[in-house]
Image: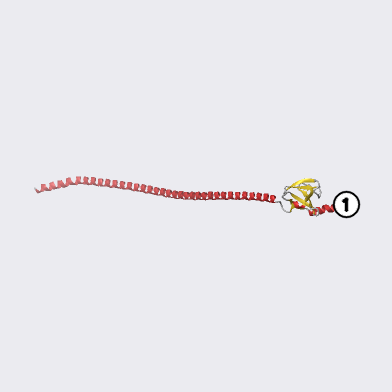
């Protein structure tokens, strides 16, 4: 006697599991979950609208559906209070949450875009600064080259000046030597005249005496 009862219970249990699906309480403010398929049955708990429940079995003859709540409570609820989709209120809340998420994402995108623009401006500024530094470096290199060229020119001019000084000194020495030679020659010429002129005068006198 017990075995057929157990088999029947197991059959009903597995049948209920096979029928299990998710449903949602409609937009009615609160729906009673009863222990039986009658309005006279004891109320197990009150279900809020939009609450998800698991359907364990249908009983279309009495208009009730056997369900299980998320907290594990089981009982019967009028089938007309169940819907295959979330309630409009839940859908609205979900839509509002999605909208808020989209608005936040849009805000972040705008902030990211503004940040990208700032980064772009900073990049352009850095590029301009780099170009200026490169130009300054190029000018510095050019100035250094010009300075080196001027230094080389100054050194060359100093060498030419030293060479001119040496040549001038040599010319001065040669001039002094020439004047010394000229002076010596004149002195020698004077000495010779000193010897020659007396003799000439003496010969003239001698010749005058012979004439008389």
Q: Nearer the viewer, residue 90 or 105?
A: 90
Residue 18 percent coordinates (x, y):
80, 54
Q: Position of residue 6 (x, y in %)?
A: 87, 51
In this rendering, the count of numbered labels is 1
In depth, the one of 205 and 98 nearer the eye is: 98
Horizontal side of residue 20 vs 162, given as left or right: right
Position of residue 92 measured from the top left corner of the image (x, y, whole percent): 67, 50
- The residue under label 1 is 5
Residue at 17% in and 46% down:
197
- Helix, strand or loop status at disc 1: helix
Percent x, y of residue 65: 79, 52
Q: Who is closer to the viewer here, 74 or 185?
A: 74
Q: Is 114 positioned to the left or the right of 89 in the image?
A: left
Q: Residue furthest front?
A: 40
Residue at image position (86%, 53%) is 8
Give the colour scheme of this rendering.
secondary structure
Q: Residue furthest right?
A: 1
Sort mark 1 into few (<14), some (14-19) or many (20+) by Cα contacts within 10 Å.
Answer: few
């Amino acid at each position: 006697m017990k075995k057929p009862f157990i088999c029947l219970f197991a059959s009903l249990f597995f049948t209920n599991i096979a029928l299990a699906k998710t449903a949602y309480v409609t937009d009615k403010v609160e729906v009673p979950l009863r222990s039986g398929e009658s309005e006279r049955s004891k109320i197990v708990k009150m279900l809020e609208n939009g609450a998800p429940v698991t359907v364990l079995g249908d009983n279309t003859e009495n208009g009730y559906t056997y369900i299980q709540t998320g907290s594990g409570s089981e009982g019967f609820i009028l089938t007309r209070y169940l819907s295959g989709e979330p309630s409009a209120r839940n859908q609205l809340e979900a839509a509002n949450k999605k909208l808020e998420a989209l608005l936040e994402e849009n805000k972040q995108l705008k902030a990211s875009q503004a940040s990208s623009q700032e980064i772009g401006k900073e990049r352009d500024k850095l590029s301009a600064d780099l170009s200026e530094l490169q130009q300054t470096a190029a000018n510095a290199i050019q100035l250094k080259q010009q300075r080196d060229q001027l230094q080389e020119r100054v050194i060359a001019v100093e060498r030419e000046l030293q060479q001119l000084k040496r040549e001038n000194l040599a010319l001065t020495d040669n001039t002094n030597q020439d004047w010394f030679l000229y002076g010596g020659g004149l002195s020698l010429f004077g000495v010779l005249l000193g010897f020659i002129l007396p003799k000439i005068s003496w010969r003239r006198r001698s010749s005058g005496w012979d004439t008389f």
